[in-house]
Image (spheres, rainbow, N blue to C red):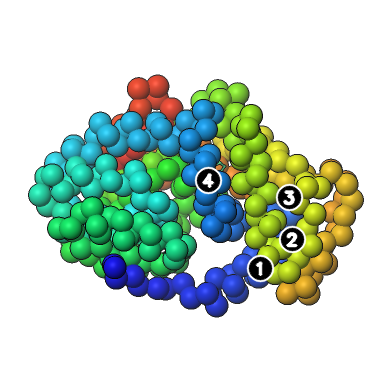
Amino acid sequence: MTLIDVHLTPDYVARALREDVRAGLSATPKWLPPKWFYDARGSELFEEITRLPEYYPTRAEREILRARAGEIAAITKAHTLVELGSGSSEKTRLLLDGLRDRGTLTSFVPLDVSESALREASDAINVDYPTIDVRGVVGDFTAHLDKLPGEPPRIVAFLGGTIGNLIPAEREAFYTSIRDVLEAGEWLLLGTDLVKDPATLVAAYDDAAGVTAEFNKNVLRVINRQLGADFDVDAFEHVAIWDADNEWIEMHLRATRAMQVLIPEIHLEVTFDEGEELSTEISAKFHRSGVEAELDKAGFTPAAWWTDSEARFALSLWQA
Ligand code: AVJ
């Protein structure tokens, strides 16, 4: 059993969901934040996405981590690995191996919104890495960065391209808040998906087997269950488009007929026109120059930039 610090109580999470659903479904156009995809079923569907032939980012990032974990350990000599949005912590093992083999690592701090995913991952790592102190934090990486334990120097890993789910203003605030919690000389390891041909990008978010469509619709199931809503999930279709101006993928749910939806727990009634789209996720793709400009603005110094063999995805290392 590992120690877990809980900064997200069920009550806090329930209130955040209500507020997000009220704000997003009262707006024009309608939107919902992507963090509500990830109940137990949503997390499973995401794991399934990472194994799809079309969804290259996970494999590309794993290739880079496998090749570079030793270098990351040699450069940083980190004593603590903090992983934000750790999920199953599967790719993290490559980093843990590199840092442990270098002999500097004493603790691992995974942070995730899902307490169940965090407990499972922390316990497994605790068993497989008996010399490392595992200290999980249940928290929101946009709100609980000030609570990170662990002996310096720390390396904060934010992998998988999840940074792409934030709009530019949110990214700026996020990078600045990480820079603020780190001491000078500590590290950020960032995974970013790169801009590439739109057909490849769209296929990664609209797979032939329909797993991403199920993942997208899962947010409606979460709202039905948590807030007593009566979304007819089958009356929505999955849409993934490449927004060339913003250089991001946008996922929508399109109402295939006019509908009224009741959300009793927040006393809200929502109307959809036929064809109306609800925005559920952006997944921004990056160029090296853009990432460098944003991190520089937040006060980080570049230490390394690595891509996979097909230059689809980048892993970059920054020093505070
Ligand atoms: C886990 C946020 C990195 O944006 O690619 C996968 C989530 N959405 N397919 C991404 C996701 C649709 C994924 N991240």
Say which residue appears at 57% left-offset and 54% top-offset.
Answer: 41
Any mark on residue 25, and which? 2
Characterize the local packing of mark 4: few (<14), some (14-19) or many (20 or more) Cα atoms within 10 angstroms: many
Q: Is mark 4 within 8 Å of ligand 1?
A: yes
**Residue 1 vertical placement versus 250 (above, below):** below
- Give, as a three-letter code, the residue at label 1: Gln
Between the C-alphas of marks 3 and 2, the distance is 8 Å
In which quadrant will I find the N terminus?
bottom left
Residue at numbered disc 4: 46
Residue at numbered disc 3: 278
Q: Secondary structure at mark 2?
A: helix
- Give, as a three-letter code, the residue at label 4: Phe
Give the camera-side residue of 103 and 28. Answer: 103
Q: Secondary structure at mark 3?
A: strand
Characterize the local packing of mark 2: few (<14), some (14-19) or many (20 or more) Cα atoms within 10 angstroms: some
- Give, as a three-letter code, the residue at label 2: Leu
Residue at numbered disc 1: 226
